[in-house]
Amino acid sequence: MNQTEHSYLNGLNDVQRQAVIATDGPVLVVAGPGSGKTRVLTYRIAHIIQSGVAPWEILALTFTNKAAREMKDRIAQVVGMRANKVWAGTFHSIFARILRVEAEKIGYPSNFTIYDSDDTKSLIGTIIKEMNLDKNSYNPNAVRSRISQAKSNLITPTLYRQNQELMEQDRAAKRPFIVEIYHKYTARCKRAGAMDFDDLLYRLFELLQKNPDGVLEKYREKFRYVLVDEFQDTNHLQYAIVRKLVEYPESPRNICVVGDDAQSIYAFRGATIQNILDFEKDFARHGIQVFKLEQNYRSTEHIVQAANEVITLNRNQIPKKIWSDKGEGQKIKIIKALTDTEEGKRVADTILEQKNRYHLSNEEIAILYRTNAQSRIFEEYLRRYNIPYKIFGGQSFYQRKEIKDMIGYLRLIVNQQDEEALRRIINFPKRGIGATTVEKISNLAADQNTSLWEVMTQANVSSRAMNSIKGFKHLISAYAERAQTENAFDVAKGIARDSGLLDLLKGDTTVDGMNRLENLNALLDGIKTFVEDDDVENLTAEVNDKSLASYLQNIALLTDLDDESKSGDYVTLMSVHSAKGLEFSSVFLVGLEEKLFPSFMALESPEGLDEERRLFYVAITRAEKHLTLSYASSRYRYGNMRYNEVSRFLEEIPRDHVESTSSIRSRFSREENRSGPPTATVRGSFKERTDARTASMKADPETFKPNPSSEIQAGMKILHLKFGEGKVLSIDGNTDNRIATIYFKEIDNPQRRIMLKFAKLQILD
DNA sequence: GTTGGTATCTGTGGA
DNA sequence: AGATACCAAC
């Protein structure tokens, strides 16, 4: 290779370059926020390819599809289209892809269903009901997380029963039958030909462990280079799989893991930073190389230093000092609000102000919160201020009822044993197969230890119900037949009509009903795109598989973050968790109150609190130039007002990185005037500041010459006698009553709507 | 079996 | 406040 082929190395700092070219043997890269981690990973893969390794011999595991896509795109910039042949994807999608090929070796159909967390929850609920357990102590969510935890630690139901500690915990929590539920749940998933999210990992491990037909060797030989992103968020099971693939006699152990212990925020789902420490230990004797990326290229110094200070309060961490040479930058702003509504308004006001002062576009701005439920108020104010925004997380498209119903049909067509899909749609639209009938079928299935589908025509039910059952079974069977040869779209279009779903929605003329119909059509359009567009990304199969089964495998692993339609010039609203890996010029981190952030759930243990602090660290390190923290002394929760103290995290930031309190106070005081008398000191500082400002902002009455209002147009810079200089953002209303939306940069509450026929405005240019 | 109303419960994060 | 679970009446 000559020098030009390696030109990409020039854009790297010393440590980054070393991490890129150390392609062989075990490598650990500890990468602080904004330290060019993705850059190192992608260049490293490109470098491996340049050295003659085939792209499909490289396995790169990430946590989000978005990260995988970005990685592929960036590799392609160096090595071209070959990049698409790299096995880059999320743990779940890559493993699903392998399992689709190998599932039959461990007793699953290759078209297995993927149960999402709703399916899991509902199945666990069904089992709890069948066992006649008290549903107050057996909360499906709690049980689900217990089972998930067990699977992530390679504990089978049998091992669970033998585990004194786990059994004792369950007894203490008055839930001694969890192990029974776990056992039944596992059997029911298997009977339904279904894997939940944990199974995608667990069953792959099982496959490699049992090693039928030398499947383990097959993948060991295939993946000559393995890379893992966000290693601090892997759980025990994921690490066990990685080790199986790369650690064996004669193995070259070409494994590179990249992570940051300070950004580990998924302990609640079994992730453990112990994996990083173990990795160092496990591969020490194989000459592990460790690189620390400590230069932050993202944020200015106040932000980086504040983050450093906060994270040192955690107990355990890999020592490192993140630094930036981007200059001091701005101090961190703090917004204190009395209520959640006021917080929303303040944040929206500040967004307007920043957009004007710093010429930020919407996409450079993000509002981050601890819980998705907080999004609503910000949404309201952004809408009111005409600021475009997109909300990520919360209820995604695929979780809507009408979409889940449709997908229920599709799932049952692909896999008739899928119990959750069958239960969802067997009587929707209504076809006279009610709860009693389903109950009878369900009992019969339990007796014969088989699926509902198999026994549904043998149940002892009324002849009317039996007719419906037969009709339903016939319908699904016919489509299952068609799905063998027809593509996903043709099947979906047909069943949408023949199931009666489409007609049902068409008959609903309410606004909600029309929305649902629109959503269903959007889903069908999506399927059409999947079938017609050869460039469409296929996460889990070879590119040309346009079958319904292939489509379903794909969407099962999509998240809200993957929605391409959400790109564009929008303010981003998302949870701190989803913001990991992203960056914004200006970040608003809201709801900094005790019991909210840190979450009340985390307050009980020091480990929980440390994880919340890491989450806080992740949040503030998303900001490049502007960081604003806000909290509200009171907010509504479940219909009643709750009072909260300011978050300890906010107080952990050293004052020298925070904008001085007097100027912050003065900003609040006007609002406080409305709701109650401000304190003397606050009033004093407010007054001072207002006076100073008034001088510059008011127009001089002597020289002020208003123009006729008809001349005012959007985009103009204008002068208002009282409000000072402003910019006309837009004009609406009819000719007799035109209303201008004007941004006055010098006043509080800067965006005003003004009726032009009354206003006196002077055009400035 | 279906419908519509009232009581009850919910309190994080996500592949 | 909003979703869901449950129950009585058609």
Image (tube, coloured by chain):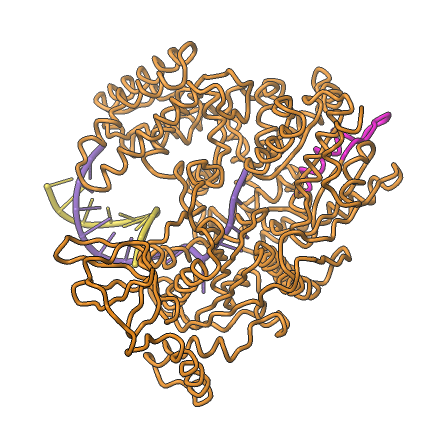
Chain colours: A orange, B purple, C yellow
Q: Residue furthest front?
A: A703
Q: Nearer the viewer, residue B7 or A660?
A: A660
Q: Quadrant of residue A564?
A: top left
Return the x and y of residue A242 as percentages of the image width and height: 72, 33
Residue at 48 percent across and 47 percent down: it is A141
Return the x and y of residue A758 as percentages of the image width and height: 17, 67
Whether residue A95 can be seen here: yes
Q: Is residue A82 left or right of residue A692?
A: right
Is A136 in the magenta?
Answer: no
Return the x and y of residue A120 as percentages of the image width and height: 48, 38
In this view, A457 is above or below B3? above
In this view, A746 is above or below A22? below
Q: Quadrant of the C terminus of chain A?
A: bottom left
Q: How many marks?
A: 0
Residue at 87 percent across and 36 percent down: it is A286
Return the x and y of residue A444 as percentages of the image width and height: 39, 26
In this view, A432 is above or below A296? above
Q: Residue furthest top?
A: A485
- Highlighted range, magenta: A234-255
Q: Residue furthest bottom?
A: A680
Q: Nearer the viewer, residue A30 or A152?
A: A30
Q: Nearer the viewer, residue A66 or A218?
A: A66
Whether residue A191 can be seen here: no
Residue at 34 percent across and 64 percent down: it is A726
Q: Nearer the viewer, residue A627 or A309?
A: A627
Q: Is residue A106 left or right of residue A723?
A: right
Q: Quadrant of residue A211?
A: top right
Q: Quadrant of the N terminus of chain A?
A: top right
